[in-house]
Image: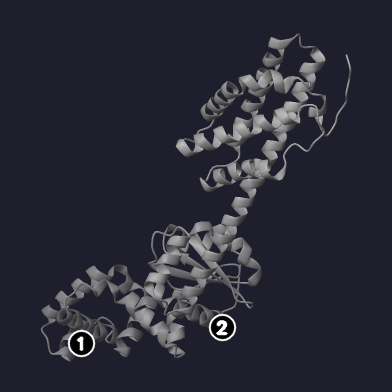
Amino acid sequence: MTYHGVTNSPWLHVPADLAVAMRPRLPAAVAAIAAAVGESSDAGGDKFERDVRTAVQVALDRFLDLAGTDEPALPPRIREVFVALGAAEARESRGPEALLASLRVASRLLLRTATEALAEQRPVSVAEVIDLSDATNAFIDELANACTDGLARQLREQAGEGDRRRRQLADLLLAGGSPPDLVREAATGIGWPGVDGVVPVLLPPDQARDARFRFGADGVVAERGRDAVLLLRTGPRADRAALAEALHGRDAVVGPALPWTEVPQAVRLAERAAELTTPGPEPIFVDDHFAALALRGEPGALAVLTAQRLAPLAGLRASQRDAFLITLASWLRHWGSRTAVAAELFVHPQTVSYRLNRLRELLGDDLDDPRVRFELQLVLADR
């Protein structure tokens, strides 16, 4: 027995008569290997089957051409066939596992087919089987490298395009005034089913990468030099409890949840709140500082506070809503005295009682919260 040792071109030691012995069996070998690869993969469809058959045909032809030579395994034109196969798997959102498993199946079948083809012509020695095994394993490794290279290239390209689209959406939202169709198209491009409410979060610049990873598909991040702005679509991951936990210890300022058309205003409110507060381990929520911002002349704060506090009354008729709000303002001024409210508004005390009972149904326990009562006074005084 001749021991050849490890070589970069193991097909140099493949019997020279392999090509003559195997070429008549090539069509059947292509069909058998393609069928086995198809069965071992969960990918389906006519295109996949055609691609696999083409790749198997190219691979077997090349392997036979290599027998007895020290040429590189895959010249560029052949390598690109398998690079393209890997890229196609990535475009179908499949990982390399199925493809590599298929190549292992192909390796076993190639060795068996080559050995049987030679055995039909003449006796085959153990050394020749070992040489064939080394050559097929090395050849399949080259194919696997080409496939994974194609898959990795495609993933990098997709990631780059995805990053570009996410930056585009972030820029459109921060700029404000963008055409709705353009914003919706940008949102669809990153997998958002639509754009409704957005919660802005101000973060230190060094938190940008972590925010992209932590919030994934639910948010986009814009880096502005002095800070980073995470724009989260409203949903479970953007509610207060979830953000309090996710942003603990990150010097975050969480703006109000507003329609996407008002993102610039929400970001400005977050910036103003940051100026009024001292960073700490817990995130700062602008919702807790609307009154302070309004008293400092921030018109956007009063507008958002008004919308939030009066939202429960939005379903009332305009005349009924005005009557309730006038009654509420008087009740807050007179510290809950129904008699004083009736006297000020020139209505019967029972009318005051009815209105206040309805207000309690609409506003609930907020009427007992001193902070909310103060915010209601600010809102109603402005009206």
Residue under the point 63% across and 72% down: 204
Which residue occupies 77% across, 25% down?
134
| Helix, strand or loop for disc 2 | helix
Is 75 left or right of 94, judged from the image as shown? right
Q: Quadrant of residue 133?
A: top right
Residue name at image x 50 percent, y 57 percent? 217
**Quadrant including the N terminus:** top right
Label 1, residues with CA under 10 Å away: few <14, some 14-19, many ≥20: some
One can see residue 258 in this view: no
Label 2, residues with CA under 10 Å away: few <14, some 14-19, many ≥20: few
Which quadrant holds the C terminus?
bottom left
Residue identifier under label 1: 340
Residue type highlighted by circle 2: Glu
| Sooner in the amino-acid sequence: mark 2 or mark 1 | 2
Given residues 220 and 30, the one toward you in this image is 30
Q: Which mark is residue 275?
A: 2
Badge 1 amino acid: Ala
| In the image: residue 370, left or right of residue 126 | left
Residue 15 in the image: x percent, y percent? 79, 20
Q: How many marks?
A: 2
Q: CA distance from mark 2 to mark 1?
A: 41 Å
User: Which of the numbered marks, if any, corresponds to residue 303?
Assistant: none
Quick one: 60 or 319, which is closer to the camera? 60
Q: Is residue 358 visible to us here?
A: yes
Residue 190: x, y in percent? 48, 60
Q: Nearer the viewer, mark 2 or mark 1?
A: 2
Q: Is residue 49 above or below residue 297?
A: above
Q: Position of residue 88 (x, y in %)?
A: 55, 45
Q: Quadrant of residue 263?
A: bottom left
Q: Residue at left 22%, top 74%?
A: 359
Task: Say if 293 sits above or below 183 in the image.
Answer: below
Q: Which quadrant holds residue 360?
A: bottom left
